[in-house]
Image (spheres, helix red, strand yellow):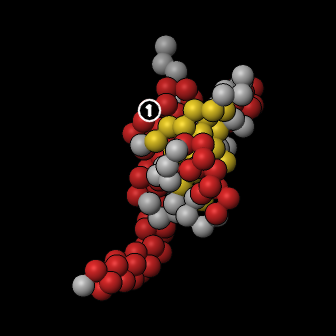
Amino acid sequence: MRLFLRYFFRTLRLLLAPVVLIAEKLSTPQSIERSANEQARVDQACRNLALYQFRTCPFCIKVRKEIARLGLPIEIRDAQLDPDHRQDLKAGGGRVKVPCLRITRDDGREEWRYESATINAYLHERFGAKTK
């Protein structure tokens, strides 16, 4: 019975994956506009960020949409298909759980943030449009 359930859900994920990815493409918002200087500052800050994710994970899609909305050039690392990224995630973050944002501080320390809501709140706080 367990084997049947395992293959049932694997088949279901395989069939739904293209639908999920197309829905993501169609519903990804436009990025915010910044001045050239501000965008250069954001680009520099994003060099210290990397998102570990699985392509069809709904929580990862939520984070990727926020990244697109904020216009952030964050490196996306697939921990499902790339064994090196999976090992980095396990070694650095302590577990293979996605989404996970790796933040490298200026002093070289690394911080690993899990949970889509936490990651999105961090990105919005750091890179969101400032209201006056």
Residue at the extreme left: 1
Where 50 sits versus 38, above or below? below
Whether residue 53 can be seen here: yes
Depth order, front residue of 96/44: 96
Depth order, front residue of 82/120: 82
Neighbor class of circle 1 (other Cα within 10 Å; few <14, some 14-19, many 20+) is some
Residue drawn where x is 52% and y is 29% of the image: 128
Residue at the extreme top: 132
Residue drawn where x is 41% and y is 52% of the image: 59
The local secondary structure at tag 1 comes to helix
Instruction: State how many labels appear.
Output: 1
Tell me residue 58's x, y (percent): 40, 58
**Quadrant of the rendering where the N terminus is positioned:** bottom left
Task: Please indicate whether residue 2 sits to the left or right of residue 47 in the image.
Answer: left
Residue drawn where x is 52% and y is 44% of the image: 94
Tell me residue 9's x, y (percent): 34, 77
Tell me residue 5's x, y (percent): 29, 80
Residue type for callout 1: Ala
Whether residue 35 can be seen here: no
Depth order, front residue of 42/91: 91
- In the picture of the structure, the residue carrying the numbered disc 1 is 121
Tell me residue 68's x, y (percent): 56, 47
